[in-house]
Image (cartoon, rainbow, N blue to C red):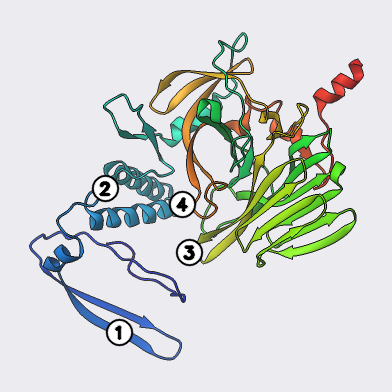
Amino acid sequence: MTQNHFRHLFDGSEIVVAGKLSDNNINNLLVEVSAQGSSDDFQVQGQAKAEDWGVIYPDEEYIFGNFTERLWAYLTIQQLLDKSDIGTVLEKEESKDRALHMSLEYGFVTPHTSMVVAKPQTEDTLVADKLTETQRQQAERAQGSTAASGVRGGGGGRGGGRGGGGGGGGGADGDPHFMIELPERDDALCFNINHKPGTIFNLVRDPKPGFIVNGEIIGKHIAGDTGNMKTYFGRFGITHDALGVRLEVSTRSIIVTQDGEQTILLWSDSTSVQWPNVKIKLTKNCSLTVTMRHSVKFMVIKHTKLWKRRHDQQSYLGFYNLETQHLSPSVYGLLGQFYHGVNFELTDRDHGASTMFVKGRALYVTRHWQKDFSRDVTAGQSIGCWFVGNNGTGLIDGVASDYIVPTLFENFWDPKEELKNLQS
C-alpha cells in the first residue's frame, strides 16, 4: 500500500491512496478515514465492492492497460524516489533499485530511466532503457576527453529562431537547463550549468543594438536531501541600449525602465502595457511576454516548485527567446552563440547514447527529455534533446565560468571581439 498517513490536509489539496491485494478472492474492502482537526475529530467508514469497479472502469481497456494498477505503480514509484534521497546508503540503493524495476515494468520515465523512440518505418515502438547513475557519471567524465582532427562531415544544422527552457535559438530554465532547438534538423541540444547561488551569467549579448540578457542563480536546500543544492534562475537583467529599455525581472516583480521612466509590476497582476519602444503582456503568476520594436521578442516564465511532503516550495524563472532574426551575426553569450546555428554530426547511436562531433571535438552524449514551456506555459512540452554533460564543455565556446559577469546589468566581455579589435 502507498502512503496512507498524512500530517496535513490543506484546503483544495488531494490525497490518493492505492494498494495491491495479495488475495485476489477478496470482494469486499473495509475503508476507514480518520482525521484530527483543530476543534473536532473526524471519522468515516465505508465498504467498497470489487464488482462495482466494472461500472466505473468498463471492460474497454484503458489506453495504457489497467488504470488502477498503473495508478498504484505510479504512486509507489514516486514514493520510492523520495525515499532514495534519504536514509542510509543501503536504504537509498534499495529504494532506487525498486523504483527502477517498477518504472521499467510499467513503462514510466523517471530520473533513472530513459526512453528511446524508434523511427516510424521500423516495427519497434517505445523502449524504456535503463541509464544507470554509473553510466551517467562515466559519460560526464568522458566529455571533451577525446579530440577529433576537425569537425567531421557536413550534416550540420542551423539554429532556429525560437527559444525555450531552453528552446530553439536558445533558452534557459530549470536547474538551470539550456536547450537549443534546431528546427531544420528536427532535433535539439541541451546542457546544464551548475554554479553557486549569486553567480550571474551572460546569456545573450549583441553589441550592435546593445541587447544584453544576464541571469542570476539562486539556490535551495531541501530538508532531508543530502545531495547537491538545487539551483535555478531567480533574476534576469535585460537591456536594449538602442531603444533605451531596461527590465529587471525577479520572482516577485518586473521593473520596466523606458528612457529613464520606471514602472513596477507584480506577478500577481494581469495586464498589457505599451511604451514607444517596448510592449509587454503579463499573465498573472505565469508568464511575461516582451516585444521590443523592430528587434527581439522573448518570454519569461515564472515557475513554483512544490515539495508537498516537505511542505516547501521555490519560485524560479525561465527565459525563452521567441524571435531572434533581428539580432546581428555578432550575438554571443551562453545562448546567443547558438542563435545562428551549430554544426555537428552524430555517430554510433546505441540505446539513447551517441558520439557527437562538434567544434573539433568528440563528445559522448545521451538522449534526454526537457520541457519547453514557451509552447505550453503550464505543463510544458517535452522535447527530445542530446545532452552534453560537464557544464556543456566542448559544446559551448570556452568554459561556463568565462560567461560570469559581476552585476546583473554588466556588459559581457567577448574575447573573440577583443581579438578582432587588436588585429584591426
Query: Between 400 and 208, which is closer to the camera in this rendering?
Result: 208
Query: Label 2's element?
Result: loop
Q: Position of residue 283 (x, y in %)?
A: 62, 60
Which residue is denoted by mark 3 in the rendering?
308
Q: Can you say whether 150 is above or below 297 in the image?
A: above
Which residue is denoted by mark 2 in the rendering?
64
Amino acid beneath label 2: Phe
Q: Are marks 4 and 3 in contact (CB under 8 Å)?
A: no
Amino acid beneath label 1: Gln
Q: In which quadrant is the C terminus drawn?
A: top right
The answer to which of marks 1 and 3 sits earlier in the sequence is 1
Query: Label 3's element?
Result: helix
Which residue is denoted by mark 1 in the rendering?
43
Disc 1 versus disc 3: distance between alpha carbons?
A: 24 Å
Image quarter for residue 54? bottom left
Which is closer to the viewer, label 4 or label 2?
2
Which is closer to the viewer, label 1 or label 2?
2
Q: In which quadrant is the N terminus drawn?
A: bottom left
Which residue is denoted by mark 4 in the rendering?
85
Q: Position of residue 354 (x, y in %)?
A: 46, 22
Amino acid beneath label 3: Lys
For residue 139, side relative to residue 397 (left or right): left
The answer to which of marks 1 and 2 sits earlier in the sequence is 1
Q: Position of residue 400 (x, y in %)?
A: 69, 33
Q: Can you say whether 353 is above or below 8 in the image?
A: above
The answer to which of marks 4 and 3 sits earlier in the sequence is 4
